[in-house]
């Protein structure tokens, strides 16, 4: 538990959520996954080292790139810096390439499903398919 001066260099979960554009629920999920850690203030609230802002932004960057939380664990050593500029480790590169292959498979499957649906609609409506707003 943190002492009286916990406010200096620490942020509460709501402040971290606001600073990183994520939810408190997601932060608790990241913590449960071992990607971030918190302490407890004397009042029992979760508090995070102010460096957690960079770490959470990097986690969100990697998740937005298509990686899973399990994939992100590989990048733990560089989450506190500029993860986009850091040279990838062999393991990190392998994970990213594997995830890219999975994403390409999903895109191909979705493209195929879209094309089948378009063909079915054309068969029923002719060429009167309009984009859905």
Image (spheres, rainbow, N blue to C red):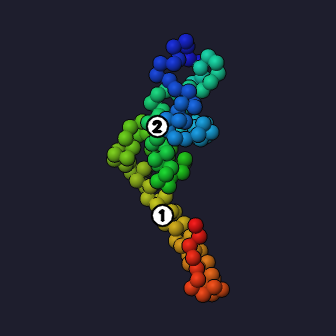
Name the spot of residue 72 as percent of width and height, x first. Answer: 49, 46
Write the residue at 53% across / 35% down: 18
Name the spot of residue 126 as percent of width and height, x first. Answer: 60, 87
Foreground pick, 87 / 42: 42
In this rendering, does residue 81 appear at all? yes
Q: Nearer the viewer, mark 2 or mark 1?
A: 2
For disc 2, the neighbor class at 10 Å (few under 14, some 14 to 19, many from 20) is many
- Looking at the rendered structure, the number of numbered marks drawn on it comes to 2
Write the residue at 58% across / 67% down: 133
Q: Which residue is mark 1?
A: 101
Vertical order, 121 against 131 (above or below): below
Vertical order, 122 against 68 (above or below): below
- For numbered disc 2, what is the local secondary structure? helix
Image quadrant for the N terminus?
Answer: top right
Image quadrant of residue 37?
top right
Write the residue at 53% across / 38% down: 35
Name the spot of residue 73 as percent of width and height, x first. Answer: 50, 44
- For numbered disc 1, what is the local secondary structure? helix
For disc 1, the neighbor class at 10 Å (few under 14, some 14 to 19, many from 20) is few
Residue 68 located left or right of residue 84: right
Q: Cα distance, mark 2 to mark 1?
A: 26 Å
In this rendering, does residue 116 appear at all? no
Name the spot of residue 117 as percent of width and height, x first. Answer: 61, 78
Answer whether labels 2 and 1 touch (C-beta < 8 Å). no
Write the residue at 49% across / 66% down: 104
Q: Which mark is residue 6?
A: none
The earlier-in-sequence mark between 2 and 1 is 2
Q: Which residue is mark 2?
A: 55
């Amino acid at each position: 538990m943190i002492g009286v001066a916990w406010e200096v260099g620490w942020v509460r979960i709501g402040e971290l959520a606001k600073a990183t554009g994520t939810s408190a629920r997601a932060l608790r999920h990241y913590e449960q996954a071992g990607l971030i850690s918190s302490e407890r203030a004397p009042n029992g609230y979760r508090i995070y080292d102010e460096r957690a802002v960079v770490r959470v932004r990097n986690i969100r960057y990697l998740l937005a790139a298509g990686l899973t939380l399990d994939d992100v664990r590989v990048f733990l050593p560089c989450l506190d810096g500029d993860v986009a500029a850091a040279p990838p480790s062999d393991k990190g590169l392998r994970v990213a390439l594997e995830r890219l292959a999975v994403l390409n498979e999903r895109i191909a499957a979705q493209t195929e499903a879209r094309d089948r649906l378009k063909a079915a609609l054309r068969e029923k409506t002719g060429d009167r398919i309009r984009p859905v707003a």
